[in-house]
Image: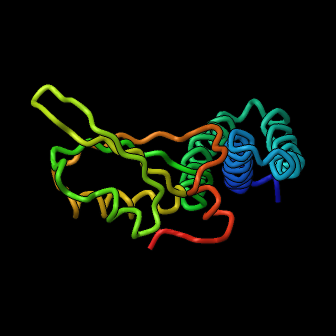
Amino acid sequence: MLENGLVMVVIILVINIVYVTFFTIRMILTLKGYRYLAAGLSVVEVLIYVVGLGLVLDNLNEIQNLIAYALGYGIGVIIGSKIEEKLALGYITVNVITKEYDRDLPKQLREKGYGVTSWAAQGLEGDRMALQVLTARKYELKLYQVIKELDPKAFIIAYEPKTIYGGFWVKSVKKGKQPQ
């Protein structure tokens, strides 16, 4: 079966897509603090890697195998990233700056289950309200939608916090409460 050139190319392509998908997910799990899950995944990952690389190295004279290996790598990165996007591990902090200082935006967001800290701020054109909103990444897009509905002109910046400790919202997440 491995004598057929096309079959070999397909096998190498699929092996590398699976390997790099695992690699991408493992790296993300490691960065998010899921060490043991990442370690378990790495065992499977390295087995797949050795088989795929072995097939390519045994047939280095066949350029199509090398091309399949490289294509599989690129496709694996895309698939791994898409899977991580769907898993949406971790939390996101969203900073919101609004001109609508008199609106009760923090209260409305809290009523929907988001953790919000707000304070008065000064912008180039006057008074502003700054908010810092914390939510699970799986609710990130929903949060943007809610903010845009409440204030279409809000300025939004988001980032992923490395460490979260204490606070009212963290306690409610541990109890299983989620944004509505």
Residue 68 placed where, x, y %? Answer: 63, 43
| The C terminus: image quadrant | bottom left
Which residue is drawn at the image coordinates 14% and 25% (left, top)? Answer: 124
Of residues 166 and 138, the one nearer the viewer is: 166
Which residue is drawn at the image coordinates 19% and 47% (left, top)? Answer: 101
Instruction: Report the residue that reaches farthest toward the bottom.
Output: 180
Of residues 156 and 77, the one nearer the viewer is: 156
Q: How many marks?
A: 0
Of residues 5 and 54, the one nearer the viewer is: 54
Residue 136 occupies which quadrant of the picture?
bottom right
Colour mode of the rendering: rainbow
| The N terminus: image quadrant | bottom right
Of residues 15 and 156, the one nearer the viewer is: 156
- In the rendered view, tell whether residue 87 sits above or below residue 31: below
Which residue is drawn at the image coordinates 75% and 44% (left, top)? Answer: 33
Instruction: Report the residue that reaches farthest toward the left.
Output: 125
Residue 107 placed where, x, y %? Answer: 34, 62
Residue 91 placed where, x, y %? Answer: 56, 51
Which residue is drawn at the image coordinates 63% and 45% (left, top)? Answer: 72
- Describe residue 32's horizontal placement relative to residue 125 as left or right: right
Residue 61 placed where, x, y %? Answer: 74, 30
- In the rendered view, tell whether residue 15 sits above or below residue 97: below
